[in-house]
Image (spheres, coloured by chain):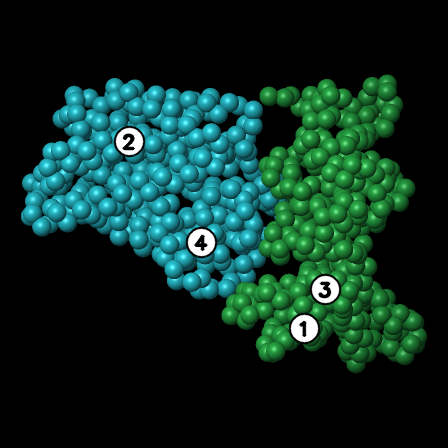
Amino acid sequence: MLTNNDLITVPQAVALIIMTVLEVGLLSLPREVATYAESDGWILVIIAWLLAFICSLVLSTLIRRFPGETFIEYSQKVIGKFLSFAIGVVLIIYFTLATAIIIRTFAEVTNAFMLPNTPREFIIIAQMLLTIYLIRHGIEPTARIAEILFPLLIVPIFAMYMIALPKADFTELLPVFNTPIKSMAVGSLYTMLNFFGLEILLILGPYLKRPDKIYWTMFVSVGVIALIFLFIVIITFSVLGVQPAKQFIWPGMTIIRMITAPGRVFERLDALAMALWTIASFTASNSMYLAGALTCFHLTKAREFKFFITILFPWVYFLASLPPNFVATEELRHIVRLGSVSVGIAVPIIVLLLSIIMKKKGETA
Amino acid sequence: MVEIDRRLFVGLVGIDVSSDPNKYTFHFSIPIAREIMGGEGGGGGGGVGGESVSQITTEAYSLTDAARNLALRINRDIYFEHMRVVVFSEDVARRGFENVLNDFARQPELNRRSRIAICEGKAEKVMQVKPWVEKLKAEYMESLYAARAKSGKFIEMDLGDFFRNLYSQNGNTLVSKICPDSTEVNIGGAGVIKDFKFIGWLNEEETQGVNFFLGKVRGGEIVAEDIGGTGTVTFTILGEKAQLSLKKAEPIPEFDFKAYVTGDIASTSHAVTYDHDKLGTKYIEELEKVISEEIKAQILKGIKRLQEDYRVDLLKLNEHLKKYRPDLWKIYEEDWEDIFPQVSIEVDVKTSIKNVGILR
């Protein structure tokens, strides 16, 4: 059923996962951690890193246990046909919603910083058409695009924020460990939600060329993501200050507008930044959309997955235009992230535990 | 999409109070591209022969409202992306300006790198200045504020820094001052903002003192009486390093402040001719002491003014406590406004002279 063309290599998988998790939400990350822990925000990122790594271990163990099988297939074995079908439907809804929210946030940022007069609907549809064009070709080209765009995104992000360093005041990161344990715990759980996107591993399983190397793949991906998060939080705190970081909706974008390199060589990096966030949200919505379509495909056991993309299109568009304003978007985003906890952590843990108890295993490939 | 030739770029924004207490008078100064071209290119421009900068005034509730008002009068689109300086009049600032400031913080198209200043008297006066040095006043004023290496007697900050200070200090900050004349402006001194309201000025010396305290001085000069009372000595500042530490915590915090200043001797009343005494090590050491004393006096003046007259912590002592002694800060936070004036600060300045010029 799967042609060789549809398998992705380890570097491709790493790139795909990183690019799925990195999206425009990153721009608001400093605000979120500052709200929970003030100057201790960067510690939250580190704790969230560990938590996210544990989650990815659960997902990876499932893939190791049932190599070459889709999530729907092996969950059927473990929890029965009906429940597995129900979870499949939830997954489809979740991935559709996640695609919608990523594209919507991208449209909001574009509207705020780049194209104030362009109708939001136009930005959404343009972005979706591009995504559809790509993912119709399958998972391997999608992963390949992620692999190609990966350095194009990561290197400029680091370079761009480095320019802000002369303005940085690292005493803004003081005091350390001054946050009550409770808000620290709540905060790190919320920060972990920023790693949403890791659950595409549920879908990715059967397409990996080397499922035996999945632990290594996840270690590298989660590590790189966390380092980028940490870097952006520290730079934003030290350049913008912790209190203002709480106030701005997208502090990560605001500091780019404040950057002046010595000698004014680089002054307005907004355009570059927007280009980068376009890449980030494009790749993230690719994976989410593809994951949604593939789940439909696995669930219905249809001959090919392409027409599911078309079926999902109006729903993604509808959900993306649903929130009337930014505040509503943010609420919807929160729901999506909570959804990511349930489908990305709770469900896999239950399935894994049950499969261990019931001693169910896939045929060893 | 608006083409660039259909846009007007605002260089200076001035804000005055108006007769209606909820409204403000907004002044925009807008450079006219064709006139600037004409002047510098040697008659290439059109035949209007007018001024290179025009000024528009309107009354409105907010900046955005003002820009919309102008839509009825001006066919081109007004753009704030290249805004250089925003000037608030004393009265606007005194009334409390979080409302009128909100536009500047909220809207991304307002240039966050533009300077912000409070002017003595009406902002309109600043708008009417016709600088003789430069053609464009926005350019002129902005580059004045960029000259931190030439003087420490003004506050160097852009809108981004301003909001950062304002938000992290609960509405207290120092802000640049601007004083209009007919062909020049003077940016020496500073305005004191307490709780989003302007409450008074610091003069140039006090401003330099506070800048020394915050470790922000990168240039400028110190003039002190020369040893033996024979005249004055001028000292050029090259750089400064400031160090603040908590000496005693209870019952009222006490701070230890050390500043290390480096610089050159620009002129002295000694060693004028060859037959005089040469500038020996001993003399230089004595001079260092004299200059240190002068700097210390300036710092103390600044501290005294803020503690006694304005009772507002712009020395960032609160930030120091919060960052390095969060346990103490929890105790003091509530009554800091009352505690701050009683805080004692020991000031110690060490000056080192690097160069004496080319005379012995």
Residue A43 percent location from the top left of the image: 41, 58
Residue A117 seen in render: yes
Q: Which residue is mark 3?
A: B311
The chain drawn in cyan is A
Residue B301 percent location from the top left of the image: 78, 68
Density class for disc 3 (Cα within 10 Å; few <14, some 14-19, many ≥20) is some
Q: Amino acid at mark 3?
A: Arg
Q: Amino acid at mark 4?
A: Tyr
Density class for disc 1 (Cα within 10 Å; few <14, some 14-19, many ≥20) is some
The chain drawn in green is B
Which tag, 2 or 4, sits closer to the chain's start? 4
Q: CA distance from mark 1 to mark 4?
A: 32 Å
Task: Tell me the element at label 1.
Answer: loop
Task: Tell me the element at label 2.
Answer: helix
Which residue is at a point 63% across and 21% down the rendered structure image?
A: B2
Q: Which residue is mark 4?
A: A36
Specify whether disc 3 shares its chain with disc 2: no
Which tag, 1 or 3, sits closer to the chain's start? 3
